[in-house]
Amino acid sequence: MSRYSAAEIETKWQEAWNTAEIFQAGRSKDKPKYYVLEMFPYPSGRIHMGHVRNYTMGDVVARFKLATGHNVLHPMGWDAFGMPAENAAMASGGHPKDWTYSNIADMRSQMKPLGLSIDWSREFATCDPEYYGQQQALFLDFLEKGLVYRKNAVVNWDPVDMTVLANEQVENGRGWRSGALVERRELTQWFFKISDHSEELLSALDTLENWPAKVRLMQENWIGKSRGLQFGFERIDGAEPITVYTTRPDTLMGASFVGISPDHPIAKQLEAESPEVAAFVAECRKGGTTEEAIETGEKLGYDTGIRVKHPLNPDWELPVWIANFILMDYGTGAIFACPAHDQRDLDFCRKYDLPVVDTFFALDNDTPVANEAFVPPKTEKVRWVNHFAGLTEATGEEAIDATVDFAEKAGWGEGVTKYRLRDWGLSRQRYWGCPIPVVHCEKCGVVPEKKENLPIQLPYDEGGKPIDFSVPGNPLDRHPTWRDCSCPSCGAPAQRETDTMDTFVDSSWYFARFTAPRADTPTDLAEAEYWMNVDQYIGGIEHAILHLLYSRFFARAMQITGHLPEKSSEPFNALFTQGMVTHAIYQTENAKGRPVYHYPEQVELRDGKAFVKDTGEEAKIIPSAKMSKSKNNVVDPLNIISSYGADTARWFVLSDSPPERDVEWTASGAEAAFKHLGRVYRVASEIADSDTADNSEDKALLREMHKAIHDVTGGVESFGFNAAIAKLYAFTNTLAKSKAGAAAKREAAKTLAQLMSPMTPHLSEEIWQLLDGEGLAATAPWPKADESMLVDDTVTLPIQINGKRRAEISVPKDMGKAEVEKIALAEHAVQKVLEGAAPKKVIVVPGRIVNVVI
RNA sequence: GCGGGCGUGAUGGAAUGGUAGACAUAUCAGACUUAAAAUCUGAAGGCCGAAUGGCCGUGUGGGUUCGAGUCCCACCGCCCGCACCA
């Protein structure tokens, strides 16, 4: 009998699968199709445990579907554009393209040993001109249908490096390289008109039954539908009224000022006229563009001196303030503030000494608001003082409705539905992305490039010299010749757009491209018709909003432009969001008190403490942190694979933690997984060699086998991988200890191999072969549980007295309620507490429990 | 600030409203061994008790129920996202 040698087994079976081409997907009518997709990776250069977990989960699904008679599509590609490639070029020279393709080659070779059931013939990278050229074609079609447009938008601007910064490149309000305070600056940029689809993207969420409820909720909140009142405040100076939008019009009598965004047209006009306003607005533009920075930053205000009339009382004048927390992108960019019933408004009014007027009180409380705003609940009654719409007691909802009615009848306002969702800005002032295929012509303006000129390829160098990425700014912008072209419309000399597309564009349609990756149009409708939609999509929760929402929008836009069939408005039938793989961080400090992070392999663990191997210094252990390159707590799966094999890595990332939750990688966990697989191999080998004739326990073993089939199948189908694995452990223990005859054990062991094969495909093939299984385990029909074998003939019922477990009885599985009750009441423990009296009530749940109430 | 989630032994976790802690890790004991490793067998939530057994126990406090880890309300703690990271 040989030992379990993962390295040998794994190479052997990967070759066998390749030779048999069992993972190549092709259209066929004899089987149902199944498209399983994991979110494709960014080619950072090394796979990490998060990848292993993600792709293993997808592989379990894919292999299970293959074994249950499906025609499976399970592709892989690379989300290959993006900043890290440029950062690498900045940090250590080289070219983003070379860096990216070499990373892809590395990662592919790291991924293949995992034994994933991937159809590699469909592989592509989004930085392949064949891919991004089709993306440019999509863009032109979108442009033609009005799905893309240009407008001004705010970006992070580094005034020292004179460059646009991504949010990620802003640290504490400063540019990451220059350290300069970041400013907000406006640029003309391209936008997808996703907001036109707000209602559709919102209401269709209800159809996504197989998406996690939390993701649908997050998207719902992100789209942010609200009903409110829109109306104008008349200006005393007779200028154009200021239009505001509010979701709480019922608090109108508590208004203390009208606030406008620093980007509001009135603010801009004042900025041009008054140096004081200009200085204030400039102050407001300091800091990053993230919503978080704006919402948590210090609230600043400036009284413009403009006065407006309250719509319900022309004698009541309200001041107009510019306030830095008001977003130009939402509503009308102007609000009225009601400090008594909104905490942010209250803080602002206290700071600038503006009046606070109560308009609502709780039913049992009439203390005026001090420093804590009273937000009238929407569904509970409150007292409405200062009311004007005929109600004195109302829920927030009733008050809002009454106000909207009142304003509409009086003619000074109208009920309006708005969405928080903003249009998707896709322009990036960076080199390593898909060029936006438009041309700027002095005479014709912005002109779409002709389709026959696609792909518009990125230039590799600058007039024969390598592009210098150490210079800030977009290399396309300063390229000596790349911009030069002729106008597609009039033929005159013109200039290319130098902005590239957001990498989210690349990932918003790759799933459709996988159905026909070599087509010379973005998709092939026949292929898309057959393979779409993705039956199961798997990826990180961090994509719950942006990537998934953009993809949902793209599917609709691709329908409008004829690139996807009718049925594909929702591209992902089922979604699973897996948790992260975490790992402890080992941290020390350098002489300057700055944190230094150590790789796990640089650290020695002793008595629950960590010591840096080189220096012996003790490191602080920060447990269960997100794996992050900057924290050096990334575990390299290659080390695991080379010491234990891919099956061990796969088994480990699936066991212990539920797939949707984070799992902490531990060395002992990997060790344990390896030991267990060795045990399974040993047990199976012994069975292959054995010839026991005693078959007295066959039925008991086969019963356990059918229970295992039932539980593991259910676990795999419902993403309960950890529970399925626990069952497999238990079944292995049962099998190892079983005294059943050789034939029964052989059958049980073969079934064990099959049940394990989605998780540990190589080991399963080996055992399958050892036990003379027919063909490949990967394609052998999935075992079926025999229902009659799932329930034991007798069941153990716990007896509770007043809900506390006091005894248990063993009864035939189909015994009637009355008889069970009789036996339960006869129990010694029950008799003891009853003391001859009759129980108040007896609850018998057949097959589960008996509860005696006294 | 806004939005979302999570909280169960020493640890990861299991549990259609029905015996809390399956399965695994770490620990301890035993077998095998000259010894160690590997392997096998067993113990184990806490407290009290020699034991039959009893009391307590799923972040905290309430509630619904014959019965709550699970449902409801409030609170505490931790984690994630916030539109130019992928």
Image: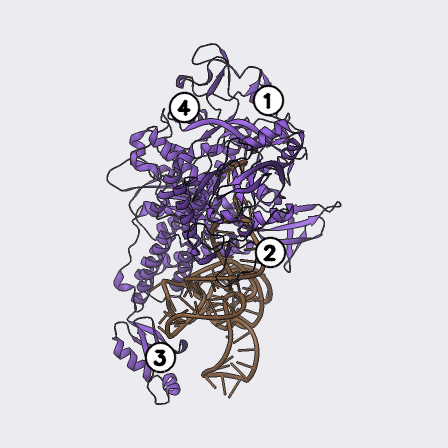
Q: Nearer the viewer, residue A722 or A625?
A: A625
Q: Earlier in the sequence, mark 4 or mark 1?
A: 4
Q: CA distance from mark 4 to mark 2?
A: 57 Å
Determine whether the residue tagged by mark 3 lies in a helix, strand or loop.
strand
Within 10 Å of disc 2 (Cα), the crowding (few <14, some 14-19, many 20+) is: few
> Disc 3 versus disc 2: distance between alpha carbons?
55 Å
**Residue B25 vs residue A357, the one in the foreground:** A357
**Marks 3 and 2 in Cβ contact (< 8 Å):** no
Q: Which chain letter goes with mark 3?
A: A
Residue A239 place in picture, x, y as percent: 53, 30
Of A636 and A87, which appears nearest the observer?
A: A87
- Across and down, in percent, residue A585 comes to 61, 50
The C terminus of chain A sits in image quarter: bottom left
Q: Which residue is mark 4?
A: A140
Distance CA(mark 2)–CA(mark 1): 61 Å
Of all chains, the one bearing label 2 is: A
Say which residue label 3 marks.
A852
Instruction: Look at the image and give the colour of chain B.
Output: brown
Q: Position of residue A341 (x, y in %)?
A: 53, 51
